Image (cartoon, rainbow, N blue to C red):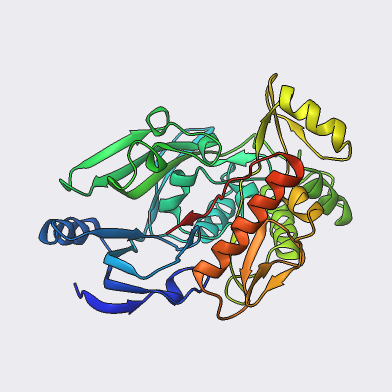
Amino acid sequence: MEIQADFSLKNYTTFGIEAKAKQFASVQNATDLATILKENSTQKKFILGGGSNMLLTQDIDALVLHIDLKGKKIIQENDDFVWVESQAGENWHEFVLWTIHQDFGGLENMSLIPGNVGTTPVQNIGAYGTEIKDTFVSCTAMAIASQEIKTFTKDECHFGYRESIFKNEAKDQYIITSVVFKLTKKNHKINISYGDIAAELTNNNITTPSLIDVSNAVIAIRQSKLPDPKVLGNSGSFFKNPIVLKTDFEKIHQKFPEMKYYDISPTEVKVPAGWLIEQAGFKGKRFGDAGIHTKQALVLVNYGTATGAEILAVSRNIQDTILKTFGIAIEAEVNVI
């Protein structure tokens, strides 16, 4: 397995930021992964998957390991459900389409989310009313220090809103190598609770949607709002939707009665970060080659030669303005390196 020095990571992240790795290796199987970890035990390491949820603001002074493990298979099934295992390096959207074409339900609302399968539990990715935790069974991970294999169950992953154990207690300790999902074979729970999906289906005269209908609707919506990273560098939604205590929100809502929100518990509401950013006047604004997308205020973009530091500065400007304007703190969903 070749380790390359001074390696450009521009084509390995969806932001398309020019940054270099001190050393770089692409790993295709668990045996090679264990070997390279063991042989480079004293070297600082940086784990890279699909590069879809990170903003590089500097060169990486470490051995960058690109996790490129491929393969997917059915490991168990009964009349109602199927358990599918995917290796970490599989492209997420291609995996979702594969499950749909097998008529396996549960992942269709998360079509076209960028990135690889192995990073989905880290972020507990989600879209249009579903999250990874809804179908997640377990994941297999390799301990970076010992190369031991551990299986994390759903409960052990401590999933939260865009959170997991891999972003907290187990951060930088494990490399996810595969993920198992439990999907439906029949009586699919079609989720069209989000208005955009229902509207798209109505526009296409679909009254009894199938899995592929929902997937196609989600793809159409995402393509209409989100730029293709291959054309315009971005990392999807840059910010989390903030969760605010109802007691605090009531005061804010009195001042801004038009503010959108969703009840998520008896004591909390979720406010759309995109609405806040748009109301603050940032949608479509450009600061050199760093900017905010013209169609979706949640998305920060690289128009060509923006540096990670320039995009980070834009994000902090947005956060400061939202806090001053609305009294609401918004957090980055993207990992800033």
Spot occupied by residue 148 in the image (x, y as percentages of width and height):
18, 43
Badge count: 0
The residue positioned 27% from the left and 72% from the top of the image is 22
Spot occupied by residue 136 in the image (x, y as percentages of width and height):
47, 38
Is residue 35 toward the left or the right of residue 226 in the image? left
Camera sees residue 237:
no
Query: Is 20 in front, or is 218?
Result: 20
Query: Is 53 in front, or is 328?
Result: 328
Is residue 132 toward the left or the right of residue 206 in the image? left
Residue 216 vertical position relative to residue 240 in the rendered view, above or below: below
- Hey, which residue is sitting farthest left in the picture? 39
Camera sees residue 285:
yes
Query: Is 270 in front, or is 87?
Result: 270
- Image quadrant for the C terminus? bottom left
Spot occupied by residue 68 in the image (x, y as percentages of width and height):
34, 64
The residue positioned 29% from the left and 46% from the top of the image is 174
Residue 18 vertical position relative to residue 203 in the rendered view, above or below: below
Is residue 82 toward the left or the right of residue 251 in the image? left
- Hey, which residue is sitting farthest top in the picture? 266
Spot occupied by residue 314 in the image (x, y as percentages of width and height):
62, 63
The residue positioned 61% from the left and 46% from the top of the image is 240
Is residue 4 toward the left or the right of residue 191 in the image? left
- Image quadrant for the N terminus? bottom left
The residue positioned 73% from the left and 60% from the top of the image is 296
Residue 191, quarter of the rendered image:
top right
Residue 289, quarter of the rendered image:
bottom right
Query: Is 43 in front, or is 179?
Result: 43
